[in-house]
Image (spheres, helix red, strand yellow):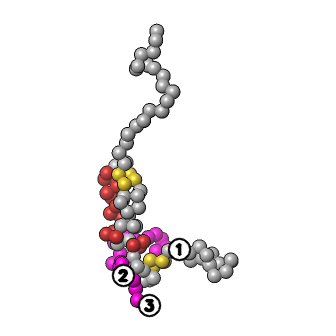
Amino acid sequence: MPDTPATATVSLPIPVVVTRHQCPHCRTTRAKKAAAAAHIARCWQNPDARACKTCAHFTPADPDGPYPEHPGWPEQCEAGRSITSGLVTACPGHTTEEPTR
């Protein structure tokens, strides 16, 4: 009995179209729209989230120390907030203006 379309074996990939929801700030994608919206609200690169990475006080990590034995410096907040346990969103000290030194 010849293979019918329902029982025919296929040796080629079958294209599948899926919908992903992408963050406009960091390009991370999520399968569910609600999960993407929740991510956008706390995305570190979203200026409206008032997160560390969009703040003028944020200093990125520097892996190079002053000499080879020095491990370098971690990410830090120049305003004095501790970010050793993770970056912060909704920070009351957030600013996009460069601090005066």
As drawn, 16 above or below 33: above
Mark 3 nearby-residue class (10 Å; few <14, some 14–19, many ≥20): few
Mark 2 nearby-residue class (10 Å; few <14, some 14–19, many ≥20): few
Q: Amino acid at mark 1?
A: Ala
The label shown at residue 101 is: 3
The label shown at residue 61 is: 1
Residue 37 position, x and y percent, is 31, 57
* Residue at 31% over, 53% down: 34
Q: CA distance from mark 1 to mark 2?
A: 20 Å
Say which of 12 and 76 sits in front: 12
Q: Amino acid at mark 2?
A: Glu
**In the rendered structure, does residue 97 fall within the stretch colored magenta?**
yes
Can the viewer see residue 81?
A: no
- Horizontal placement of 42 versus 70: left or right? left
* Residue stretch rendered in magenta on the structure: 83-101
**In the rendered structure, does residue 87 fall within the stretch colored magenta?**
yes
The quarter of the picture where residue 35 lies is: bottom left
Residue 72 position, x and y percent, is 60, 76
* Residue at 33% over, 78% down: 92
